Amino acid sequence: MDFFNCSICGQKFDSFMWCDSCQIQEFENNFKNWTGENEEIDYFIQQTQLKAKDFDQFIQWMPYEGFDIIKKIGQGGFSKVYEAIWRDGPIWNWNSKSKKWDRNDSCKVALKVLEGSKDSTKFLEEVSAYVECAALSVHKQTILRCYGISQDPETRDYIIVLEYMPNGNIRRFLKQNSTKCDWSFRISILKDILHGLLTIHKRDLIHCNLHAGNILMRNTFNGRESKIVIADIGQCGPPYHPHGDDLYGVMPYISPEVLRGNEYTQASDIYSLGMLMYELISGIPPFSNRAHDQALMFDICNGLRPEIKKYIDNIPDNFINILRKCWDPNPFNRPTAYDLFLFDNYGELSVKNDEIFESKYEIHPGAIYTSRELSIYTQSLSQDEMIEWNTEKRLEVPGR
């Protein structure tokens, strides 16, 4: 096999085993052989294939019968996630002799079933974000890979087919491996999260739902490979609900200006990142000791943040300072993802890891860490609390 030149046109590959013109032609020739029975979805998939520059920059329509369901592995506010075997496996090359796509072996995937989505294509926003970010994550994949779209034949709910992450989310991983995850490991996780968030923000996108449940851990941590991937990009509400005034998400991770009724911005993602930083140093979900109700929402809007006094003496000052800046009530005072990505002086612990990181904690029965509608709480917030921010005021990241 020639790894440098296309077997169809003989020209040098544009990227590894990928010839732009020939791959696109083969995709186009194959359009007649599949359909999702929805013109908008078909067109969307076709466009990803016609614009692709590599094998992870397009998606496919994936018939439901091509999966062997293993078990349910997750439940979100508006979706269920199943572990499954994709019998065909991912495409990696067009075989000019057999006139078929060469594929990797069958592999495990995660099927995200979008409840109530049968009459909506709003979920394409999330799929589009995955595809767009894939183009910027070539050297270090920190965004969960999306393989394609399917549909449950019984419920008609649409399914996003995603890369499978056997270690689950970062909260579960830290709890199960608290003593093994030392300071340098946690900082490397933070840097990987920042890489992924910067990738999202470079595309002028906003995650809108950044929390520990959407940071997934890889199975192995070899070489320069990212330890995490970010999931659920830009999909903070149900797939059938149009954009409006309703608020969805995980309350402790939502910035005060968004709770007050302002739109999500990249700065609100940074506030959510601050909560992830807190969970990285403490091992405890933010506000796990109280109900996530109207009282907490009022307190957050009035400046309440998770308690960090017990960590100040042992966690490096630079880390604490950045954490506080991410939590600033004024979104224009928060650092950007680019600011934080460039910063590389988080310091060292002054004590042993097991004196800092906690793995045992109790969660209040009213503390909810899955996305849900929060509008019932926000409606009572006074419109007088809406804040006009000074767009010129910014704080510097320490060490810049």
Image: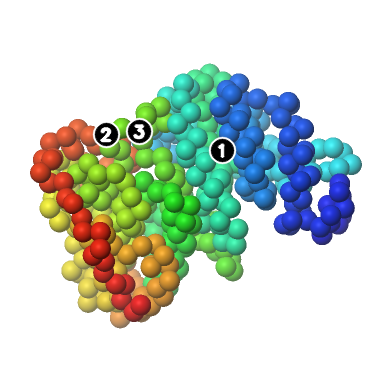
Q: Which disc number belongs to residue 243?
A: 3
Q: Residue at x 57, y 29 (%)?
A: 41
Q: Which disc number belongs to residue 161?
A: 1
According to the picture, the residue beneath numbered tag 2 turns out to be 245
Of label 1 and label 2, which has the lower sequence position? 1
Q: Is residue 282 above or below residue 118?
A: below
Q: Residue at x 40, y 73 (%)?
A: 343
Q: Residues within 10 Å of mark 3 (few under 14, many from 20)?
A: few
Q: Residues within 10 Å of mark 2 (few under 14, many from 20)?
A: few
Q: Identify the element where label 3 is drawn.
A: loop
Q: Residues within 10 Å of mark 1 (few under 14, many from 20)?
A: many
Horizontally, is 366 left or right of 136 in the view? left
Q: Amino acid at mark 1?
A: Val
Q: Nearer the viewer, residue 25 or 198?
A: 25
**Disc 1 to disc 3, C-alpha distance:** 24 Å
Q: Are marks 2 and 3 in contact (CB under 8 Å)?
A: no
Q: Amino acid at mark 3?
A: His
Horizontally, is 229 left or right of 266 in the view? right
Q: Residue furthest front?
A: 392
Q: Are marks 1 and 2 in contact (CB under 8 Å)?
A: no
Q: Amino acid at mark 2?
A: Asp
Q: Identify the element where label 2 is drawn.
A: loop
Percent x, y for residue 94? 79, 44
Horizontally, is 392 left or right of 137 in the view? left
Q: Residue at x 86, y 42 (%)?
A: 96
Q: Looking at the rendering, in which quadrant would you find the C terminus?
A: bottom left
Residue 82 in view (yes/no)? no
